[in-house]
Image: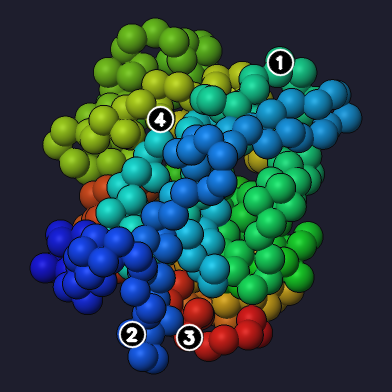
Amino acid sequence: MKRWLGGVSSVLLAVAVTACVSGTEPPPAAGSSEPSLRSYFRTDPGVDTAGVRLIPIRTPRGDFKVWTKRFGHNPRIRLLLLHGGPGATHEYFEALERPLAAEGIEFIYYDQLGSAYSDQPKDESLWTIERFVDEVEQVRQALELTRDDFYLLGHSWGGLLATEYALAHPQHLKGLVISNIMMSMPDYNRYASEVLAKGIDPAVVREIRDLERRGAYEEPRYMELLTPHFYAKHVCRLEEWPDAVNRAFAKINKQVYVMMQGPSEFGLSGRLEKWDRKADLGRITVPTLVVGATHDTMDPEHMRWVSTQVKHGSFLLCPQGSHMAMWDDQRTYAEGLVRFLKEVDARGSPI
């Protein structure tokens, strides 16, 4: 717990103090492979943009820019974060800032096209899995992420996208994290109907279904029912939702979200409705951490199964967590993630 809250280890603090006194960065301790504070927080030449970089993206419908922000420097562990939605934002990943920085892990926020600080074109033909995969590859190239350092974490829709990227571009990855997303949307729809819905008062489910049949998704009553009976149980179980989660949800691009996910929270009906990669999981050979949570919208036993289907998989269960397990089971999530990253790094060459 001391390490969790402290931000940096006593060894790194000693290095920092020595550097401040001497005015130069001391050499790393013998046998040490960890970045020093100064090397981790070093600035790039020129104007310090606080790590923010707008990356040009080429698409069949023109050129756009997507927003990224790098935090820290680590030549061996560089973690690109893929947010959910589709159409949400990087902001809810702020839960991981302190634990990742405390371990000297470089991480990169990234708003996908259509999200938050990135361009938001209206052309519906842009919202396909294939184009998003190509976008991630263009981001990787621009950031110069390589098989020697590139870890990809995708949460929810971002986990689907990370899976697709791993299947299309496995040669570039050092490690993969699939967080809180089932590998079959038909299976998810069954789980939502047969398990999640049955955990709600039948009268509430009937009223929600009636509102959905009428297309009344924007009526206040729809959210009045969903918030206490679904979101508070399965999306984020904290009594007061963190500001970062509220900001991310407030900025969701509804055009992208509804086009791909569909308007209902009880199942998918958009372009992702038939997505299923269960049969292809054996093709993922990069070291892979699969994260599930006991109270998630996604079946945690399915997530455990996914970890057995990839070639080099491991499973992390967040027993107190829901869909936003990085917040409502924060310590389990963060410590499990850091442990995986460091274990893969310790192996040396990617498998």
Q: Closer to the observer: label 2 or label 3?
A: 2
- Among the two numbered marks 2 and 1 on one chain, the one whose residue lies closer to the N terminus: 2
* Residue 259 placement: quadrant: top right
Q: Position of residue 283 (x, y in %)?
A: 73, 74
Whole-Å distance between the Cαs marked 2 and 4? 41 Å
Residue 71 appears in the figure: yes
Q: Is residue 29 left or right of residue 142?
A: left
- Among the two numbered marks 2 and 3 on one chain, the one whose residue lies closer to the N terminus: 2
**The C terminus, quarter of image:** bottom right
Q: Position of residue 82 (x, y in %)?
A: 54, 47
How dense is the environment of label 4, judged by Cα within 10 Å: few (below 14), some, or many (20 and up)? many
Question: Helix, strand or loop at disc 2?
Answer: loop
Question: Helix, strand or loop at disc 3?
Answer: helix
How dense is the environment of label 2, judged by Cα within 10 Å: few (below 14), some, or many (20 and up)? few
What is the three-letter code of the residue carrying label 1? Lys
Residue 305 appears in the figure: no
Q: Pointer 2: what residue?
A: 29
**The N terminus, quarter of image:** bottom left
Q: Is residue 216 left or right of residue 331?
A: right
